[in-house]
């Protein structure tokens, strides 16, 4: 769950000569430099964090967060093939092209290897979830299958499960598990549903999905990863079985998560998601951030089930639309939640409230955080793309304009909860701002007949840059890795910020021996 990213020992800074590269700094200066490469760049053995600082617990949102990064990269790395002899990237023309003696999996040899490693790590996570983490309120390791019905007794992933470490085959292993917080939370559920749905789409071998990328089919055809049994790839979902291949794992776990977000967290009468299921009861608190991101997760699940594009193409139409029953149920919840945000959570000045409590009379949480504003924008755009109902797009545009009017702080050239005062940022704040702004740039910018100055494309991109430089480079990003980040170690120079963006290399980022390239848990911006 957590740990201090400060290194436990001095990183190995022994260098060898690197390439001559042209660099452009954050200040716009370009020059050609001779680089050197420190040992820690290629061998991570001296980059361990302090083990004593770790909270060695499983948490579904944490697992889901890293799983999402893994599966997005896996799809990128394995989305095509390459000519084995030349490493030239080529489009996969069939799922057996890698068996012709000329082509190999992955868009390059290095990317293919990275994709295989990440896919294996993802499968490991899903196996642990399926085999060991199912919880029914009494015990862990409860079995569940594709016929799971929460009405017959819910099974969920507990909010926190402490781990006792052991050792097996010379590496650390799970020797014991104990639930320390049995709650099912909405954040855990959507944070896990989203990546498992992505993994479902990535590993999808259903015969009905004629649009699946042949390169992905080649990865899951038995070499290197096991193929799904025929029962799980035919048109009949009623005969699906529990299995340990990639697609069967994603199919089974996404089904559990989807049924749980509907049964444990969706208040059908009010049309909104609630934050907790605890002691056998659905709670009554609505958190705008988590409600909005539940829309995003459901939109990915709906697209995966219906065989529409996901990943970076999740706003695009596809050649296939299976119109599954689960997809229709997801769309109904997306519409219900988006309508609830518009009807109950938008204040008189156009900003959204952080949440409310569902009592006989609704009680508002009248705080209006940056987190909630940008999460609402993200969620409403997802609803617009899922339903094609323009009212959700207009609502998202209105919230963004209210953010510009009420929250932009000219003194720091970005937004503040209260302009002129310090705003606390967390990684969830940055995720919402980055995601919300990306959607604004892609889907809310002015089109023909629209002329809102704040929604001009150049204005939106300027806002993104100024926010990133002020908040991310300004302090949230604790350290910077080398290479693609723009950071280099230059021969004959002692500089640890060669791209001049204000973020230092890991060896000079604080702590006794340096700090890993993580985000701060909390930062005050003013």
Image (cartoon, helix red, strand yellow):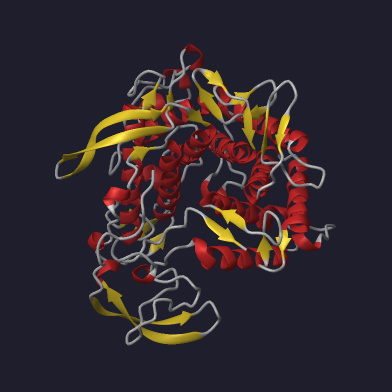
Residue nearest the observer in this picture, 77 or 474: 474
Outermost residue, front direction? 421
In this rendering, position of residue 146 left or right of residue 125:
right
Q: Residue at x 34, y 43 (%)?
A: 55
Residue 424 drawn above or below residue 387: below
Residue shown at 70% from the left, 36% from the top: 338
Residue 313 visible in rendering: yes
Res. 83 in view: no
- The percent position of residue 178, horizontal first and vertical second, equals 32, 28
Q: Is residue 418 left or right of residue 2?
A: right
Residue extending furthest toward the left: 169
For residue 442, which quarter of the picture?
bottom right
Question: Where is 445 relative to 410, above or below?
Answer: above
Considering depth in this image, is 207 or 184 the residue closer to the camera?
Answer: 184
Q: Position of residue 264 (x, y in %)?
A: 54, 23
| Figure quadrant of the N terminus | top left
Quarter containing the C terminus: bottom right
Residue ranking furthest to the top: 152
Q: Is residue 151 depicted above or below 4 in this figure?
A: above
Query: Residue 454 vs residue 206: left or right?
Result: right
Q: Position of residue 426 (x, y in %)?
A: 53, 52
Residue 506 location, x and y as percent? 36, 67
State the image quarter where residue 18 is shown.
Answer: bottom left
Q: Residue at x 54, y 28 (%)?
A: 276
């Amino acid at each position: 769950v957590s740990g201090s990213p400060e290194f436990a020992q001095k990183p190995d800074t022994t260098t060898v000569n690197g390439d001559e590269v042209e660099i452009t700094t954050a200040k716009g200066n370009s020059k050609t430099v001779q680089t050197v490469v420190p040992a820690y760049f290629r061998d991570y053995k001296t980059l361990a964090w302090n083990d004593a600082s770790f909270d060695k617990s499983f948490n579904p949102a944490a697992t889901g967060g890293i799983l999402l990064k893994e599966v997005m990269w896996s799809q990128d790395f394995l989305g095509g093939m390459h000519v084995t002899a030349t490493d030239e990237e080529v489009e996969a023309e069939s799922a057996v092209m890698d068996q012709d003696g000329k082509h190999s999996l992955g868009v390059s040899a290095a990317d293919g290897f990275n994709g295989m490693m990440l896919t294996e790590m993802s499968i490991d996570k899903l196996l642990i979830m399926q085999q060991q983490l199912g919880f029914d309120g009494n015990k862990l390791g409860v079995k569940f299958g594709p016929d799971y019905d929460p009405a017959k007794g819910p099974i969920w992933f507990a909010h926190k499960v402490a781990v006792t470490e052991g050792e097996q085959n010379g590496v650390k292993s799970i020797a014991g598990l104990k639930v320390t917080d049995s709650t099912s939370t909405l954040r855990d559920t959507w944070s896990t549903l989203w990546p498992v749905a992505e993994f479902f789409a990535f590993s999808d071998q259903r015969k009905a999905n004629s649009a699946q990328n042949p390169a992905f089919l080649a990865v899951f055809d038995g070499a290197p990863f096991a193929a799904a049994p025929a029962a799980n790839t035919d048109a009949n979902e009623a005969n699906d079985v529990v299995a340990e291949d990639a697609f069967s794992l994603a199919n089974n776990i996404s089904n559990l998560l989807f049924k749980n977000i509907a049964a444990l967290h969706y208040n059908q009468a009010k049309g909104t998601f609630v934050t907790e299921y605890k002691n056998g009861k659905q709670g009554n608190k609505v958190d705008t951030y988590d409600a909005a991101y539940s829309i995003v997760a459901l939109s990915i699940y709906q697209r995966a089930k219906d065989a529409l594009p996901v990943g970076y193409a999740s706003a695009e139409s596809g050649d296939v639309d299976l119109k599954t029953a689960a997809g229709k149920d997801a769309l109904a919840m997306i519409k219900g939640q988006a309508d609830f945000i518009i009807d109950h959570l938008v204040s008189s000045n156009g900003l959204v409230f952080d949440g409310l409590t569902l009592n006989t009379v609704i009680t508002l949480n009248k705080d209006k955080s940056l987190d909630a504003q940008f999460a609402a924008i993200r969620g409403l755009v997802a609803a617009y793309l899922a339903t094609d109902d323009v009212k959700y797009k207009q609502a998202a545009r209105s919230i963004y304009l209210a953010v510009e009017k009420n929250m932009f702080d000219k003194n720091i050239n970005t937004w503040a909860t209260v302009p002129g005062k310090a705003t606390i940022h967390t990684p969830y704040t940055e995720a919402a701002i980055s995601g919300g702004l990306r959607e604004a740039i892609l889907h809310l910018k002015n089109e023909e007949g629209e002329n809102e100055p704040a929604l001009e494309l150049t204005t939106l991109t300027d806002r993104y840059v100024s926010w990133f430089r002020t908040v991310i480079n300004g302090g949230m990003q604790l350290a910077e890795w080398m290479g693609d980040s723009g950071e280099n170690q230059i021969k004959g120079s002692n500089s640890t910020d060669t791209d001049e963006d204000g973020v230092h290399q890991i060896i000079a980022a604080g702590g006794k021996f340096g700090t890993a390239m993580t985000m701060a848990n909390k930062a005050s911006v003013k």
